[in-house]
């Protein structure tokens, strides 16, 4: 008799890695099991290459979109009590442990209020960054982001700016005052941990994660996981 499906040999790609066949399990309360929130593809490889892999991936994404799986929620951020210091008082652009004291306090204060993180202003009262990630905004199809003159110019930030420019999206680095936040439609943060994460709220300001954020999330995933994107 043929082996039951759950007891076969081999490996399965599961949540971003190859796991032994028997280890690719789902919880009994999985939403997909009870409420059928599930889409799938059947694909076959010939000579080691998946036949029409891109067409299958596109259909999978389309199926998910049709079932409304693609909603970008966005983080809720507080406005931090402490400000990024004047570079005349501390080496503000170093990734030095001492600079993280106010970040940790700010993150913990935000979390106690039910927020994911906090956006910090700088010593002048201008928009700076989050406690461990950079911040970017979108207005009329252009990206606006604070000039990193007193905080870390993150490697993810630089990568995303390059990806945006490659797509022909204008990126403007400038001083941004918090009064301007009501004019921006989309907002997202970048960092090695955050990758590209949409933001829905900063204190009383509201944003709607939209097409540019989504595009850059996809471009960033393709950039950091080139083989996964090409498969
Ligand atoms: N700002 C701060 C304060 C950070 O700790 C980080 C994370 N290293 C970033 C920005 C983002 O930098 P990167 O994209 O290089 O991770």
Image (cartoon, rainbow, N blue to C red):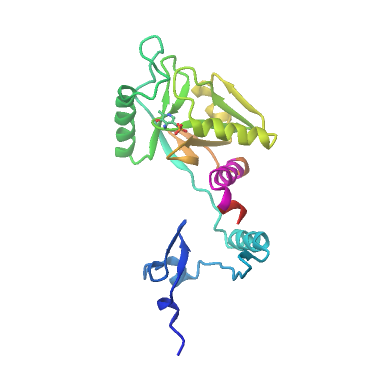
Location of residue 157 with respect to 98 vertically, above or below: below
Prevailing secondary structure of the magenta residues: helix
Q: Hey, which residue is sitting farthest front in the picture?
A: 47
Q: Which residues are magenta?
A: 213-227
The part of the image, by quadrant, that contains residue 104 is top left
- Looking at the rendered structure, the number of numbered marks drawn on it comes to 0
Residue at 54% x, 48% y is: 225
Residue 159 in the image, given as x and y percentages of width and height: 56, 34
**Quadrant of the image for the C terminus?**
bottom right
Residue 45 in the image, given as x and y percentages of width and height: 61, 68
Q: Hey, which residue is sitting farthest top in the picture?
A: 88
Q: Hey, which residue is sitting farthest bottom in the picture?
A: 1
Can see residue 144? yes
Residue 214 in the image, given as x and y percentages of width and height: 58, 45
Can see residue 26? no
The part of the image, by quadrant, that contains residue 167 is top right
Residue at 45% x, 27% y is: 129
Q: Tell which of 38 and 17 is nearer to you.
A: 17
Location of residue 132 with respect to 208 vertically, above or below: above
Residue at 56% x, 68% y is: 40
Residue 180 is inside the magenta segment:
no
Quadrant field for ligand 1: top left
Residue at 47% x, 66% y is: 12
């Amino acid at each position: 008799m043929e082996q039951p499906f759950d007891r076969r040999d081999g490996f399965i790609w599961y949540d971003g890695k190859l796991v032994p066949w028997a280890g690719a399990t789902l919880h009994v309360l999985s939403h997909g099991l009870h409420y059928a929130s599930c889409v799938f593809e059947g694909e076959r490889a010939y000579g080691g290459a998946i036949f029409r892999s891109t067409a299958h991936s596109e259909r999978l994404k389309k199926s998910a979109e049709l079932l409304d799986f693609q909603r970008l929620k966005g983080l809720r951020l507080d406005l931090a009590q402490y400000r990024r210091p004047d570079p005349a008082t501390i080496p503000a652009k170093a990734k030095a442990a001492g600079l993280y004291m106010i970040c940790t306090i700010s993150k913990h204060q935000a979390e106690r209020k039910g927020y994911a993180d906090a956006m910090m202003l700088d010593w002048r009262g201008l928009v700076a960054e989050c406690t461990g990630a950079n911040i970017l905004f979108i207005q009329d199809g252009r990206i606006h982001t604070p000039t990193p003159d007193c905080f870390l110019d993150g490697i993810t930030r630089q990568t995303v700016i390059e990806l945006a420019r490659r797509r022909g999206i204008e990126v403007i680095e400038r001083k941004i005052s918090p009064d301007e936040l009501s004019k921006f439609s989309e907002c997202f943060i970048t960092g090695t941990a955050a990758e590209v994460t949409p933001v829905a709220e900063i204190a009383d300001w509201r944003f709607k994660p939209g097409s540019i954020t989504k595009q850059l999330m996809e471009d960033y995933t393709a950039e950091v996981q080139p083989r996964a994107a090409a498969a």
